[in-house]
Amino acid sequence: MLSEGYSSLDTEMAVIVREPFAATWLQHEDRTPLVRLAANTNYWDKDRGPHLSEVVFRNDLEYEDALELVCSTEGEVDIVTMVPPEAAKKVENSEHAKLVAHDGIYSVAGIINRDTEGLPPLSDKRARKAMNLAIDRGRIVREAMFGHASPLAGLTPDSALPEENPLSPYAHDPDEAARLWNEAGGENTRPIRIAAFEENGRVARAVARDLEASLGVDTEVVVHPADAELRVRRRLAEKKLPHEWDVFIFGHGAQSADGVALELHRAFVGKTGELRAGAVLPEFEALMGELFSKTDPTEQAEVSARIDRFVHDEALALFLAAPQSLYAVNDHVDFTPYRVTFELADTRMGEEHWSLR
């Protein structure tokens, strides 16, 4: 139960299409320095909890300070969320914290601008396949994501599939990539423009390196600062102006473990997709319409797999990697991560935790 402070999201709407009406919400966070939650001791399911008497969210700390406190002190910070992969070693080598890694439902992929000009047309499947064949996903996972990710085959991470993914990631095949690129339109008249937000800047530069090496092209990389994110997201969603990039390296996740295609694939490819950059595809819309009509989980999974295969076979995105969710957690806290949300319902403290000594 909220006992002190508040945590609020102010939202503004960006209209994607008007018929049928579809919009996305652009969010601004408004939080007090401390948000304190007290346990609801009258909760009906005693087996579920509460296991913690109080939870305090500290919004008064810069990220670097919070990470330092959980790693080198006790009594200040017990959990730091959204640890970037480059900081994982710091946590693993720390005196007071451990690294908790979890496979969530989150994909990092390249939005391909199928309306772009000045390149072999990216509306041509051969050009999009060439770009996918140009990428060394294993090296991106190792070097740009520090091993805390897995290569993507389609848009759906393996962790969200009910059974082993029948798709395989595009192979790293520079020769075939160059052949298809030239077959699709020949030489570029300008560099390939790659954009990203700060969190994926390292991945964007790795993608640029692979495209240059495999396709023999020049590239330009633009990394947007955090204070430009809402503006860039609005322009992407509303699609009123031509995009100033050819590939946008973008991280996107699902808010539910069920019906992942309804979020990931719709967002990247669908008519109502806030990330779509190109013409609406009738065959994709027909598959999504079929998925909308399903209520049986088995049938939903079957149609979702067909959607993932269609998006893969048509190379409708630059498939990169599914990063893990990383947490820095006090050694004496038993933290159970959830796949799509941050929850503390199953978190407990050990007898050696500083608050119990």
Image: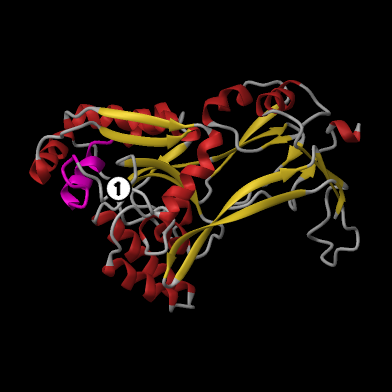
- Foreground of the two, 292 or 29: 29
How many numbered circles does the render carry? 1
Q: Is residue 225 left or right of 29 when viewed as pictured? A: left
Residue 19 in the figure: left or right of residue 128: right
Q: Determine which quarter of the picture holds residue 156.
A: bottom left
**Residue 130 among magenta residues:** yes
Magenta-colored span: 118-135
Using the image as rendered, state which of residue 64 and residue 270 is in the foreground.
Answer: 270
Dot 1: what SS? loop
* Residue 195 picture location, percent across and down: 38, 36
Figure quadrant of the C terminus = top right
In the visual, does 302 lie left or right of 47?
A: left
Residue at (57, 28) in percent of width and height: 88
Quadrant of the rendering where the N terminus is positioned: bottom right
Q: Amino acid at mark 1?
A: Asn
Asked whether residue 263 appears in the rendered view, the answer is yes
Mark 1 surroundings: few (<14), some (14-19) or many (≥20) residues within 10 A: many
Residue displayed at 34% across by 45% down: 243
Residue 266: image quadrant is bottom left
Residue at figure coordinates x 51%, y 37% from the top left: 228
Look at mark 1 in the image and give the residue it sits on. 113
Q: In the image, residue 64 lies at what x, y percent?
A: 66, 24
Colouring scheme, one of rainbow, by chain, secondary structure, one colour: secondary structure
Image coords of residue 78 (percent x, y): 76, 34
Question: Which of the pair 287/61 is nearer the observer?
Answer: 61
Can residue 106 be seen here? The reply is no
Looking at this view, is 299 or 311 the one in front? 311
Q: Position of residue 221 (x, y in %)?
A: 35, 29
The reply to whether the magenta stretch includes residue 31 is no
